[in-house]
Image: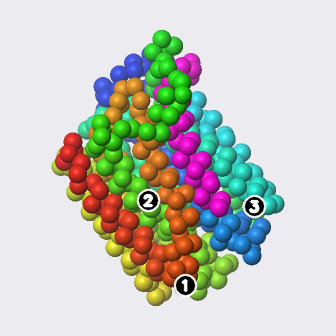
Amino acid sequence: MRWLPPQARAHAVAAPYARRAGWPFILIYGLAYMGLWMALLPPILVGLAMRVREIAPAHATGSLSLVVGVGALMALFGNPFFGRLSDRTTSRFGMRRPWLVAGALGGMAGLAIIATAASVPQLLLGWCVAQLAYNAQLAALAAILSDQIPASQRGTVSGIVNISLPLGMAGGTFLVEALADSTLATFLVPAAVALAGALILAWALPDHRLAEAQRPRYGWREFLGSFWINPLRFPDFAWTWNSRFLLYAGVALLMTYQEFYLIRQLGCAPADVPRWIFLSTLVQSCTVAVFSILGGGLSDALGRRKVFVCGGALAYALALLVIAFAASYPWFLAGMAVAGIAQGVYLAADLALVNDVLPERETHAARNLGIFNIASVLPQSLMPAIAPGILSLSGGSYATLFVAAAVFVALGAWAILPVRGVR
């Protein structure tokens, strides 16, 4: 749907894919995504590990795995659940707009709890609140791509969305470093950016308004259906889900244990970790930004998705191997650069691909995209539970851990091959 001025929004017709989206709306959409990632990703990259080391230094690894793992379970539940609620929201403010704003406000509250926590249980509570709230916002954001963007633009807009992720990571980690003297500011300033982005998008969004008579029924069967799509009925969606899950298994291991890897394998001083992670995130962000646009645009122009998804996954597996055997920080940076190239190509094409094969788009877009996003968040829970066993069996070798991650990602490249509905 094209860009509409505020006075025309009330008259927007709920007819998805009718018009091409204008660049002002696309940029605002990307900025809202970027704000969310600025608030949500730095706690995973730096903030949670920093707080765990302050609160429970003797049990830092186990406590971090607990907090990240349980928080990921909240995201696993929250994304499809709030997606289902968004699909049946009859508010006069629209279907997606209330969840954009409420999610950003709730996420800020969760990060405030983390910043002021004095114990691991308080830290866990704050991260669970933040994950639930930001995944409510994320469910609404994901549905907007299906609601407002025609198929011919999805690769390009997916590229813009994927740029928002590394820019959010880089911006968030920069703020963590710049505001390191104030724990409260470290968490709340990125949260304020996320809230501002949500408010601007809510203002600009020509949101659909669902009539009460069109509201889908909701009972126990529908609640359970919020977390399940029959893979036999929709095999293309199932294979795409599997590919994303396997890729994010590798991503989760790298993101969660990057700080400990830098300290224990590369000998980084704990005080220097935020700066080292910021530099690596900046390198990765630049490559993701360039190759998201290139990959998404080429995917649209060629009308092909699978070759970009497979190639991106294989390149990410190669990046994990480079990181696993890095003997110095420059080699680690080289691995992160390759990871950025791979992630940009993969995610731009994969996000467009899943929207191309999305079941029941007209009635259950947010719910089904929420189920797809389980593939991104479930590894954040499973991998921290599996990783201590891998580390124990390998004598604490982070090289072995990242080789295992590379195997998962390579399997993710294979999993996209059986998709038949998209080239």
Q: Which residue is mark 2?
A: 248
Tell me the distance, in whole angstroms, between the alpha carbons under discs 2 and 3.
26 Å
Left or right: 252 with respect to 297? right
Helix, strand, or loop for circle 3? helix
Residue at 61% in and 44% down: 132
- Between 131 and 220, the residue placed more toward the observer is 220
Residue at 54% in and 36% down: 81
Which x, y percent locates residue 249?
45, 62
Q: Quadrant of residue 68?
A: bottom right
Helix, strand, or loop for circle 2? helix
Residue 189 visible (yes or no): no
Examine the residues drawn in magenta and state their main secondary structure. Answer: helix
Instruction: Please state which of the two labelled residues, at mark 3 or mark 1, is closer to the viewer.
Output: 1
Residue count near mark 1 (Cα–Cα under 10 Å), binned few <14, some 14–19, many ≥20:
few
Q: Which residue is mark 1?
A: 395
Helix, strand, or loop for circle 1? loop
State yes or no: discs 3 and 1 in contact (Cβ < 8 Å): no
Q: Which residue is mark 3?
A: 120
User: Magenta segment range?
Assistant: 66-95
Q: Amino acid at mark 3?
A: Val
Which x, y percent locates residue 27?
43, 43
